Image (cartoon, rainbow, N blue to C red):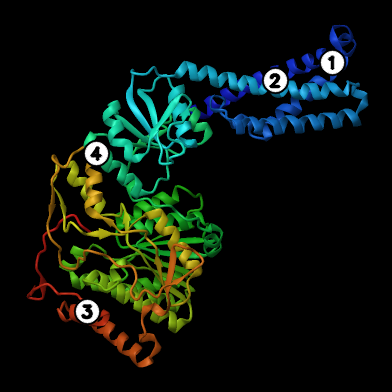
Amino acid sequence: MNKTILWLKQIISVRVLSDTLLIIFSLYASLYLRLGSVEIHEHLPVMNNWLPIFVIIRIGFLFNFGCYHVIWRYITSSDVVKLLKPVLLSSALIMSIAYFLPELGRLPRSFFIIDSILVTLFLTGIRLFWRIYNEGKGTTPHGTGSITLIYGAGKNGRTLLQRFQNDSSTTLDVIGFIDDDPKKIGRVISGINVLGCKEDLPKLIQTHNVKQLIISLPHLPGIKIREIIKITRPFNIKPHITTKLTHREKADMSVDIHRKIELRDLLSRPQREINLSSIKQLIKGKRILVTGAGGSIGSELARQIFNSEPSRLLLLDHSEYNLYKIDKELRLATHDTSTVVPLLIDLKNEKTLSSAFNEFSPEIVFHAAAYKHVHLVEANPYPSILNNVEGTKNLLNASQDVNVNTFVLISSDKAVNPAGVMGATKRVCELLTTDFAKKTGQNYVSVRFGNVLGSSGSLIPLLQQQVKAGGPVTITHQDMTRYFMLIPEAVSLVLKAATIARPGDINVLKMGDPIKILSIAQSLIALMGKTEEEISIIFTGLRPGEKIFEELYIRGDELKTEHPDILTIPNGDSDVFLSSTKRKILMNQIENIIEQANNSTKDAVFTLNEVVNSNYIAPKLEQDKPTDISIVTSN
């Protein structure tokens, strides 16, 4: 970083020096053109008085308009227009000074106009010359590098091509563009033809013996990237994707302008803008508690909340190591050691939890702690029920005692028509949250979404491990699909949902289209440089508690909110809260579930099933203990 900063300073100082010399040359050239070789001598003393004023004002305006942030070797027509503004405005200021300060000496008015024209030509010319010089110097001769196609003939594609043309050390030989816009096909960009569209890729790869494909669109939807990988897979081509860089980074040849495609690229989707001001207004200056703060969702919640400047951030987790990691990470970012408070607490310990709430009085609670791995929860239903259901109930009681005004439960798509213990416990937690919202009148809500990429112990890392180990890759069913979302995006939407939800509601995050696990596995194998002949895919069959398709909605009567990716289901998606009798029965059933789980009796599972009215089929139990279930990769 220090070397980069030093390098930038050196570059800017050279540019300022060259611009200064050109400004000085333009002044005397303009005076000569206006007065000729005879009269110029009479005005030279006046010109010498004006010289520092011209230089200081013009260089100052060039700095102020960011002209030295533009990389000369990448200068475009828009950069030339950007250069006109400081020249014209500085000329206007200089002419105003000449009018109000005649004691500096008089110069012909036409001189100012001539100088404005000349200095514009000189400043533009030196930049264009440098770009042409670098393009000629850096161009890789055809046939000397890996034959490469660029996918996308827009602005990013042209920038990518210029970088390769200017980098003499590149090993890529770009022979053409691919673009899905039929109007661009056949056109020439910087000497390179647009050869065809995506459908033409197989033929072009074979015809030109293409070895590399670089996608120039950094925000291309995941479904498009998966299609491209499917096309290039038979040719053993692992496509790259361009990195989003600033102008300064583009000029630094040590910064890679493209990278390998990652799993997050395959699952990406167009992101909507989120009003961060409303989130900051909710968080800033408040006491915030995050449970499961050491987990994948909880830790990202902690990071984003921390950036919104809470007065105190309480990190609660019962894993010492996970809590240590997120606590250490956030403490490094602040000198105020009292802002971040680690709480090593098990939610089932009601007294310890209550004591912490009474001491710190959180105003907002984000509840991300839960046992979530389906096969582990199925194999261990009783501790899972206690952790998820009793832990949530204890947390809600503690929140009610200290008048927490916003409580957000992180729920799951598996709570919809649950097929197993994990989804059923999440559904019960949703019902509990809505019940407390009705009792307190406070903004207690649930947010429901699907799988997130890269969470601890989730599907994707397990698939990667299997490919690295040489296979086989195990998938439970060839038609299994899941909703996926990137963790930062999911957490941002959770925070946004907290600002718009009403007491007792369930917010549902729109996850885009479900993705076939088989498609992800095939793309992953290709990305890791393997073929399906080398890495076999085995279908193991569904395990207890799993569904082929996950659902995000229950009745389909969800309502739109102010954000297009957040929907809402009023009243916890249940009519039980419309009747005090039904509500009382429900709470008694939940108490029974907790008591039965504490006693490790199988009735806990059956009562849980009855409460959520799910299609759960309990596994065979021997001495009230679940049988072992073989572990495979699906989540």
Q: Identity of the amino acid at label 3?
A: Asn
Give the spatial CA distance, label 1 vs label 4.
Answer: 68 Å
Residue pointed to by mark 4: 233
Q: Which residue is mark 2?
A: 20
- Reply above or below: 377 against 596: above
Label 3: which secondary element: helix
Residue that extends furthest to the right in the rendered view of this protein: 103
- Disc 2 crowd rating (10 Å Cα; few below 14, some 14-19, many 20+) is some
Say which residue appears at 70% left-offset and 31% top-offset. Answer: 84
| Numbered disc in front, either 3 or 1 | 1
The quarter of the picture where residue 294 lies is bottom left
Graded by Cα atoms within 10 Å as few (under 14), some (14 to 19) or many (20 or more), the crowding at tag 3 reads many
The image shows residue 445 at horizontal and vertical percentages of 42, 73
Q: Which residue is mark 3?
A: 609
Q: Nearer the viewer, mark 1 or mark 2?
A: 1
**Residues under numbered marks 4 and 2 in contact, where contact means CB atoms less than 8 Å apart:** no
Q: CA distance from mark 1 to mark 2?
A: 21 Å
Residue that appears at 19% across and 73% down: 382
Three-letter amino acid code of the residue under disc 1: Arg
Residue 34's label in the rendered image is 1
Identify the mark nearer the N-term, 1 or 2: 2
Question: Can residue 397 be spotted in the picture?
Answer: no
Counting residues from the N terminus, which is met first, the one under dot 4 or under dot 3?
4
The amino acid pointed to by label 2 is Thr
Above or below, 211 against 197 in this view is: above
Residue 165 rendering spot, x and y as whole percentages: 45, 23
Closer-to-camera residue (308/598)? 308
Q: Residues within 10 Å of mark 1 (few under 14, many from 20)?
A: some
Say whether disc 3 or disc 1 marks the residue closer to the N-terminus. 1
- Looking at the picture, tell me which residue is in the foreground, 60 or 602: 60
